[in-house]
Amino acid sequence: MTVNAPLLSVRGVKTCYGNITALHGIDLDVHDGEIVTLIGANGAGKSTLMMTIFGNPRAREGRIVYQGRDITQLQTHEIARLNIAQAPEGRRIFSRMTVMENLQMGAQIAEPGHFQEDLERIFTLFPRLKERIGQRGGTLSGGEQQMLSIARALMSRPRLLLLDEPSLGLAPLIARQIFDIIADLNRRTKLTVLLVEQNAFHALRLAHRGYVMVNGRITLSGTGKELLDRPEIRAAYLEGGRQEATAEAR
Ligand SMILES: Nc1ncnc2c1ncn2[C@@H]1O[C@H](COP(=O)(O)OP(=O)(O)OP(=O)(O)O)[C@@H](O)[C@H]1O
Ligand SMILES: [Mg+2]
């Protein structure tokens, strides 16, 4: 692997559900230390791409290369062992397990020696989870479940974190905290992030680069700022964001 090769490279990836093609040949790169965001309308194929990178569903065509290794045909548990973690859409925490047990599940892939240290780091990021340590996942509030989903992914000490709509259903203030945490982890620990977000304004401000997906195809890419400045992006994805931006400027 050359020094400048991307950490993750997706080339010509096609994914189908039965006869329906959800991804029509996706090309996307994530470099070491980057936050890359993927934006697009409902049903565009964003979650499908995240899940395809994680091996389920599997790419029918194309190649996914991580750290110079072709992972296209690997099983999900094999991919997880390569220090890729996923916080999927819809949270998917273990609802009958406690907060602590969920975090222990996340840590299974990491070296056991780091558990206590990682737990303390997670509780500094999400003090709310510390207060709820013995509570069952399913009885947490929506926002707390989202925090737990992200915290569990972080407990595996990922090099690449795939985050699917982390702000979904969260109050604006909590969503901001989640974005701040992502930015902070990226700055301090060089955590590399591929982020799917419905809140395109926050996502593009946070990300180094972004891709726009329409009907299973990438139609635009650029730096977060370039995409934020494009009128067609503003018109299609930033109506709410523009209001927020104006409110913030006041
Ligand atoms: N398990 C499935 N079986 C059949 N079709 C599916 C399945 N999962 C997703 N699809 C279809 O694939 C397309 C892409 O869905 P996907 O969930 O990837 O979109 P998305 O961009 O994540 O949308 P959203 O913003 O609403 O989360 C949609 O048309 C969806 O109906
Ligand atoms: Mg989705």
Image (tube, rainbow, N blue to C red):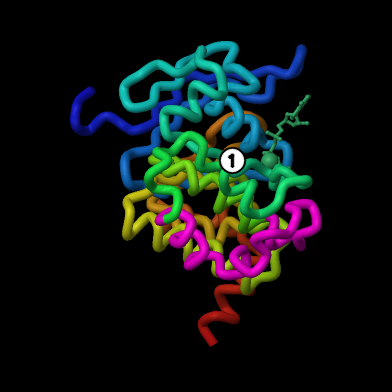
Q: Nearer the viewer, residue 248 or 182?
A: 182
Residue placed under numbered mark 1 in the picture: 105
Q: Quadrant of residue 187?
A: bottom left
Q: Position of residue 248 (x, y in %)?
A: 54, 80
Magenta span: 117-145
Q: Quadrant of residue 121?
A: bottom left
Q: Position of residue 244 (x, y in %)?
A: 61, 73
Q: Nearer the viewer, residue 151 or 132?
A: 132
Q: Is residue 246 left or right of residue 66?
A: right
Residue sitting at 68 percent across and 44 percent down?
A: 89
Q: Nearer the viewer, residue 48 or 110?
A: 110
Residue sitting at 49 percent across and 25 percent down?
A: 79
Q: Amino acid at mark 1?
A: Met
Queried whether the magenta region covers residue 133, the answer comes back as yes
Q: Is residue 129 above or below residue 157?
A: below
Residue sitting at 49 percent across and 59 percent down?
A: 122
Q: Position of residue 207 (x, y in %)?
A: 43, 54
Q: Main secondary structure of the magenta part?
A: helix
Q: Position of residue 120 (x, y in %)?
A: 46, 61
Queried whether the magenta region covers residue 142, the answer comes back as yes
Quarter, ligand 1: top right
